[in-house]
Amino acid sequence: MTDTTTTPSGTDESGTHASGTHASGAAELLAGFEATIARNDRVEPRDWMPEGYRKTLVRQVAQHAHSEIIGMQPEGNWIGRAPSLRRKAILLAKVQDEAGHGLYLYSACETLGVSRGQLTEMLIEGRQKYSSIFNYPTLSYADVGTIGWLVDGAAICNQVPLCRTSFGPYGRAMIRICKEESFHQRQGYELLMTMMQGTDEQRAMVQESVNRFWWPALMMFGPPDDESPNSAQSMAWGIKRNTNDDLRQRFVDMSVPQAKALGVTFPDPELRWNDERQAHDFGQPDWDEFMQVVKGNGPCNTQRIAHRRKAHEDGAWVREAASAYAAQQASVREEGVA
Ligand code: BYC
């Protein structure tokens, strides 16, 4: 935590000048912030921070929150068609956890001066992104398992280092989220293992699902490092702790032995162990497809946003009732004081 407690308001892009603040005062604030980052300490909401740092965090944390909330849809699609009561209870719990993750992250984002209402508006108006992975459809129950194993597995790889991110509320939210993601990953793997021990048809369902999700899972880590405009600054600020390519490599190395134990293959002819690097070589996802999905032209983008917009509109009465109740309670308190 920095020694200074000035709010970020009134700073310019670089955060070096606040109106009415003496230049040396601004330099001191920046030096305090940089010292916090250099010490690997947490920056807290009331600490002074450069405006660029605040904006980058709002962008990433909001995208992360939106991903959790939109990510409820592909799996939610199967709750009513789960093959047993046990599978239904597990899936319900997982999807509810995702709602919780979204809420922790929206709360973390609110400490940066943006309200959850504003963030939701930006999502449904297409002004903020969410993870590309959730624009792919879930076509069979095996997809529930594959999402748990590969999508939550990729999420864990990406998110464990984020527990050490430089912004306090984000890092603390990630600690809790990662614990739950581990359960999500295991439930997916266990579902796929059960199916692999079933009939030939079930095994084929698992392999077909893995074939569809492998490349989109690799895309979750973002573009290659040399095409990632935000990585260098985010790493310098300690927001990101690893590059996109480093985490993608870690994910591939982690997943290959798991696939072997499961008895499935990945649809990549270039995938092989490289003894020299002590890591797997692998092919590149179709980055043109990634760009299309991120731009809104993936298989399910329109459906995902339409569904989110409708849920938001359908919930208007709850927000109105909560606001009316809060206003009424405030006036009761005021009368009591008077
Ligand atoms: N999808 O400069 P880059 C979950 C954008 S939820 C869409 O490398 P950055 C789960 C990127 O935003 C898991 N867009 O960016 C939930 C940037 O565009 P803008 C969600 C992507 O931020 C339910 C541009 O491409 N996880 O696990 O340095 C059920 C250039 O990229 C993607 C998180 O959100 C993508 N895949 O690095 C099951 C993790 N990749 O914003 C599971 C937190 C890149 O400049 N986020 N873009 O317009 C991060 O770690 C980083 O934001 C990223 C990207 C690694 C994703």
Image: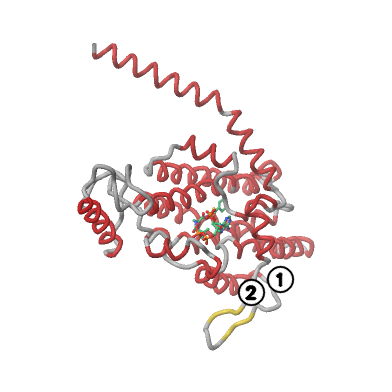
Labels 1 and 2 touching (C-beta < 8 A): no
Q: Residue 334's image quarter?
A: top left
**Front one among 74 and 121:** 121
Amino acid carrying mark 1 in the image: Pro
Q: Position of residue 293 (x, y in %)?
A: 66, 55
- Element marked by disc 1: loop
Q: What quarter of the picture does the N terminus occupy?
A: bottom left
Question: Is residue 67 depicted above or below 199 in this figure?
Answer: above
Circle 1 sits on which residue?
267
**Which mark sits nearer the N-terminus, 1 or 2?**
2
**Front one among 293 and 335:** 293
- Element marked by disc 2: helix
Name which residue lies at 58% across and 70% down.
255
Q: Nearer the viewer, mark 1 or mark 2?
A: 1
Q: In the picture provided, is 39 more to the left or to the right than 316?
A: left
Q: Which mark is residue 260?
A: 2
